[in-house]
Image: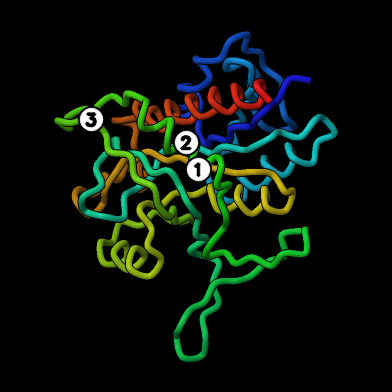
Amino acid sequence: MTACVAVICAMESEAVHLRRRLEQPHERQLSLWRRTTGMLGPMEVEIIVSGIGLINAAAATAVRLAATEPRPLAVFNYGCAGAHRDDIEAGDVIIGDRTVHTSSVIVLPDGGRRPFRFWSGHDVISDTETLGIDPHLLDLATRMAGRTLLPAWPGVGHNPVVHVGAIASADVWTQHGESIRTLHTEHGTLCEEMEAAAIAQVCAKFGVSFLPVKDISNNELRQKTEHTSEGSLSLDDVREQLGLRAALIVEATIVALGASVAGG
């Protein structure tokens, strides 16, 4: 039986980068979600577009992992994110060595905070401050990133930098500079996004390996994202760039994983 991995993206504009790299692509609807299946080398790949946010990401991941069809070897999540440090620029990539669910906290009587804990489903208690990443996938992705040519972000005069570190995750887009610095100080996070913590927790429940890879679309510490006339935030001006560099690293990692599985 052909080995399979699943890739969860929040948006079509992110998923398109890996989808166009698939061989023999075909559509296989996953309940409410678009799923495209194809091959990258010897590995079957399912690209699932979950929609933005923790609930959408958790629902799509759970439906896939609970399905009667064979369970994927691993789940990858890639897409765009906002930087948590001044020196991290648009186009840079964050390979997550942990995810932090920054909205899953207990506010103590003295005003202090501590993370919630949860049962993973395998008699293991974890907390939402250190949602785990598969160390083999992390090592493989880090090595593949060093061999992958990443195009420069438009207007940035150098090739992207790849960082390894913590990814903040919540249904929150933080524009306030001091709040961003507080998140970084308290959690050591390099960026924030809205899906990885949910996917990580669902994968932990099902005992499936997980790795998030994010590329930076905005750094609110350096330049605020503009609001639309309706009051929402928009990255439409860089839509074609969203997730592109993360997709290249995920592709290289999946191909290498497929080769190692095929080789025994």
Amino acid, disc 1: Leu
Badge 1 is on which residue? Answer: 138
Residue lying at the far front of the rendered structure: 264
Taking the spot 61% from the left edge, 47% from the top edge, the residue there is 199
Circle 1: is it few (<14), some (14-19), or many (20+) Cα within 10 Å? many
Up-down: is 128 above or below 248?
Answer: below
Badge 2 is on which residue? Answer: 141
Circle 2: is it few (<14), some (14-19), or many (20+) Cα within 10 Å? many
Quadrant position of residue 215: top left
Q: Which quadrant is home to the C terminus?
A: top right
Q: Is residue 154 left or right of residue 247?
A: left
Distance in Å between CA atoms under marks 2 and 1: 5 Å
Taking the spot 53% from the left edge, 35% from the top edge, the residue there is 9
Distance in Å between CA atoms under marks 3 and 1: 22 Å
Residue contact between numbered discs 2 and 1, judged by CB atoms under 8 Å: yes
- Please state which of the two labelled residues, at mark 3 or mark 1, is closer to the viewer: 1
Residue lying at the far right of the rendered structure: 68
Q: Is residue 18 left or right of residue 71?
A: left
Badge 3 is on which residue? Answer: 159
Quadrant position of residue 40: top right
